[in-house]
Amino acid sequence: MSHLVLLRHGQSVWNAENRFTGWTDVDLSPVGEDEARQAGRLLREEQEAGQLDLVGVHTSLLTRAVRTATLALETMGRPWLPVRRSWRLNERHYGDLQGRNKAETAERHGLEQVQRWRRSYDEPPPPLDPSDPRSGTQDPRYRGLPASALPRSECLADVVRRVVPWFEDCLAADLAHGDVLVVAHGNSIRALAKHLKGISDEAIVDLEVPTGVPWVLRFGPDLTLEEDRFLGDPATVAALQEAVRRQAGG
Ligand SMILES: O=C(O)[C@@H](CO)OP(=O)(O)O
């Protein structure tokens, strides 16, 4: 038996400003730092109850996930756990929407269109021009990647295509040895959950992941998913999910 904990980073500065973020490297807000520590406290309780024994951690290459992992591990009392990072866990690239306010974008393009860009499985937002200063082509963290691999916009299906090979090559082997924490982003976690829980292209539209709430998946032999639960009060988690759903309005 092993556990996979999926943790969306704490609230970022742009989450607080209700702006599309994607691959933009935005730091945690003070609220997000608190959420990361609270996630660490919940994980420590699981650990003390004998329900969790982390052997490793994975994060994306984005600062908000890196710092959330650090704060949570310090609070758990396991700052020494080995950590690996991959661009494949990055947030979905939000193309030309990156930096724009979600509610203002809905006023401009209509709520229905914005919700399709946010949640449909296969409709990517308008792409970013490679010459746009918001493009990551000069970012040293991606220097190992060919420029053609850097997305200019992604739909959730694109994220599934980059996350599933990472799960199979990297994470599945780790889970054979024990419990693993993955600190990533709303849409990379939705992509992973889609794969692990066999959620359909239609039903994935309804899955929302709140910031800073650990989501524990328990696997049996042969990586069969046996149970999954968010840590914390269910009504609070449901209210946080609803708030994410309504970020563009409605
Ligand atoms: O802006 C983003 O990168 C994501 C996560 O914050 O937004 P959304 O939840 O709208 O997909």
Image (cartoon, rainbow, N blue to C red):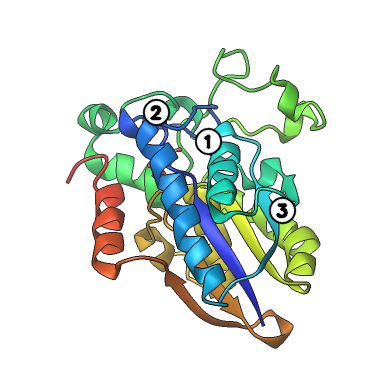
Q: Does the rendering let one see residue 126?
A: yes
Gap between marks 2 and 3 measured at Cα: 27 Å
Q: Nearer the viewer, residue 15 or 88?
A: 15
Give residue 13's mark: 2
Q: Point out residue 174 in the picture as x, y percentages from the top left corner.
A: 77, 65
| Tag 2 secondary structure | helix
- Residue at (41% x, 66% y) in the render: 231
The reply, left or right, for residue 1 in relation to residue 206 is right
Q: Depth-wise, is mark 3 or mark 1 nearer the camera?
A: 3
Q: Name the amino acid type tagged 3.
A: Leu
The reply, left or right, for residue 177 in relation to residue 118 is right
Q: Name the amino acid type tagged 2.
A: Val
* Residue 210 higher or lower than 42, as above or below: above
Give residue 81's mark: 3
User: Crowding near pointer 1: few (<14 within 10 Å), some, many (20+)?
Assistant: many
The residue beneath circle 1 is 64
The image quadrant of residue 10 is top left
- Residue at (47% x, 70% y) in the render: 200
Q: Point out residue 64 in the picture as x, y percentages from the top left corner.
A: 53, 36
**First in residue order: circle 1 vs circle 2:** 2
* Residue 8 higher or lower than 17, as above or below: below
Q: Name the amino acid type tagged 1.
A: Arg
Q: Is mark 3 within 8 Å of ligand 1?
A: no
**First in residue order: circle 3 vs circle 1:** 1
